Image (cartoon, rainbow, N blue to C red):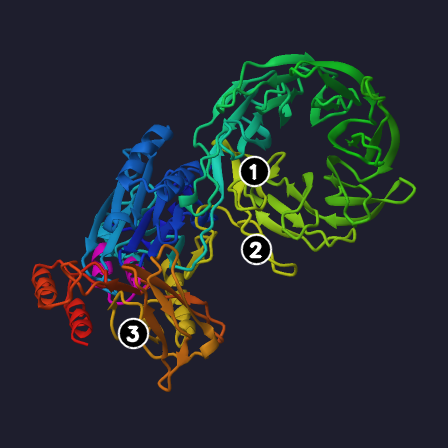
Amino acid sequence: MVRTAVQAITLLGACDTANGTWSIILVDTRTGEVAIGSATCLTGFDLKAHTPVLLTGIGGATAQSAVDLTGQNRVFIRDLMLLGTSPASIITGLAGFDAGHQSRQYGIIDTRAGGRATSFTGSGAGQYRGGRTGRFVGAGITGGDIVYAIQGNVLTGPPVIDAAVAAVGATAGDLAAKLMAGMEAAREMGGDGRCSCGPGDPTGCGSPPADFPKSAHIAYMLVARVGDRNGSNGVYRVGTTSQATTAADLNADGKPDLITCNMGASSISVSLNQTVGSTEGVPMFSPTPTNFTVASSPRDLVAADFSGDGLMDIAVVNYVSDNLSVLQGRGDGTLMTRVNFALGDGPSALIAGDFDRDGDTDLAIANQLASSVTIMANNGAGVFSSVQTVPSGSAPAAITAADLDGDGDLDLVVGASGDNAVAVLRNITVIGGAANFFLAASIPAGRGITGVVAADFNGDDRIDIAASAATDNRLNVLLQNAAGSWSQTSQATFSPGPLGVRAQDVTGDGVPDLVSVSRNTAASQLGVFAGIGDGTFSPLRSFAIGFQPGRFTLADLNGDGDLDAAIPVTVTGGNSVMVMENLNVPVDAGDDWNGFNNGIGCATGDYFLDFNVANQQQSDPDPVFTLRARYDAWRGETAGHPDAIRTRVVFDHGALPADGQSTTRMTILPRDWRDVPVVLPIGLVEVVQAPGSDGVSTLGPVTANADGTFSLTVTAGTALGTDEFVIRLQDTQGGRAVVLMPPPSFGTFTLDWDDNGELNSEDFFGFLGDYLVGNADINRDGVTDSRDFFDFVAAFFR
């Protein structure tokens, strides 16, 4: 049956906002390029934020049909791809990890083992549903295979997938051209049947429908090349209504693990750190946590060695049961059964420190409903007793500790949210006596205080204070003067409702910065105000969270020397701890800080091609038409700029004898995507040995040639092996810097083929015999061919 355009559009309002439709994943096995495209018949939705996983040089995936809005499934895929797990094994793992597995559809390809691809369609995906995987041998520009996984659900019929496969195989050009052709071919067959036919009967109009208004509402296309930056935030499963997260090494492997308290589940979740060097430094944690029961409604937690055994323990305050739960660590990532200690009414925050200077770690707890702070002394074995309860001002919601007056004792700063002030509790403990505090000052600090920190913000060796004021949408800074009092000197707007604040150096310049999170569900952000060092701060830099956040922590989670963020988040369908990677620390003062990874989803990096047609409505054009318009404009803009694949590298000899003196010339021929020569200044061509090379060559300086090419001399060393070269071309015309793909390689070989210490005709004929049977790949490019023959002959008879 054929429906009119008006009828189809009228029916679109019934579209399920949790379904994704067709997707195309392509990998060039020689260059390592990865391309992903997808489209669906949903309005007001960002498909790119919720379905792709894109890892430069490693692979790509789409997770569609019933979309996992928590993102946990995509992070599960990302982490296993980074670890080298095959796509088929990832699907097997998802079946056990995800209770809704049969409602999902996946396509996954990686670049390992010649390109491995799989497509999975669960029994709960809408008809027509299906997928195809395969390869087009030698179809890449540089001779690599093009491996594909193309799948969809609620399509008009099988021709949507078949036409996309055929278009990818028949289209000349690079991976971007093939992806564009595949997306258009799927559209021409009707694409998503809910848009081209009707929500109630997507297959009822044929494939393609005789007349249809649109194939989808939203779509995206991505292509990643070597040199592009990956981007994704980890999200890992925790308990219900996660409130606060801290970091500590619970299994003594030298890596901080994450511990999250879950108000709804009355538990804490331990997520062990599984980061390894082979995963490009991406912080990774166990996909399924180990949960430990505490008391009712935990709100905050700290980690420290309370028992003095060198192992990290956990202390948690429980708001409803009015007590403290202490769980001692075993050193293997697990915790002992909790021991509870009574507290005041409504404990909401705590801080650890040696408050009585006896060498043991004590606790100070803010009791929100009692408007007090309880000091819990540690007997050295992790057993706590209340030694003092101090008035703190009304409704304390946050607490921190610092030596405010330089006397060697830890004082307390409390966020008294009911008074819109910070309370300073001075420590006047007598050595050998019980901890003793008194309320020394109450300083106005804004309405709705949710967090307090203490640090020296202006370099005068006096401890200052900052508070997050949620009602005012501000972070307020109070500098301490020479008289030992504080006054508000600056404020930083951060909307809406900053929840907590940290004063730590995330930018790597040695100056404490202010970091907070805004609490606004989908619009939530991690905000950074970089410290200047004089008590003022740089303007806000914000990074998308996308979920409702809780109290966060900062720690070096991947061992790269900078502080990453771990944030408990709540979203419909599950609770998670989100891990946001700090992308770098400046090497020298004045270098730009790259910030935290920014964006929602597992494809938020900086890619060669990145088109996203998101949040459209029914009245907007078909997104594939929009993709085509952007693609054509992008092709026009990149004409005349160097292209990573079309640019060629030629060696006079791809291999040389390992004699320490033989040389060859490497010539670089810059080309744009049309294969047209590009002229570049000499200073913008960089050639270095790639990491992992054998170091069997030395490189001379790059020189410019009259014909617009560049050359340099490669001198063989005395060792046998292979070097790959990273060749980076900058662009003075505003284009992207490109890294040539695939990386050119050079090898050294021995002329003494029979390795008997003599060079004679037996070596030549020995080489010839091996060459004839395909066993003489002296340039180590993976194939024995005429280049190997002529390189050996040229060197042997020189």
Q: Is residue 597 magenta?
A: no
What is the magenta segment's predominant secondary structure?
A: helix
Give the total number of marks visible in the rendering: 3
Disc 1 residue type (three-letter): Ala
**Which of the two discs, 1 and 3, labels the residue nearer the N terminus?**
1
Q: Are marks 1 and 3 in contact (CB under 8 Å)?
A: no
Determine whether the residue tagged by mark 1 lies in a helix, strand or loop. Answer: strand
Quadrant where the C terminus is found in the figure? bottom left
Which residue in the protein does label 1 denote?
566
Q: Position of residue 677 (x, y in %)?
A: 35, 79
- Which residue matches tag 3? 664
Give coordinates of residue 236: x percent, y percent.
Answer: 47, 34
Front position among marks 2 and 3? 3
Residue positioned 82% across, 43% down in the render:
462
Mark 1 burial class by Cα count in 10 Å: few <14, some 14-19, many 20+:
many
Residue indicated by mark 2: 594
Q: Which residues are magenta?
A: 165-182
Under mark 3, the amino acid is Thr
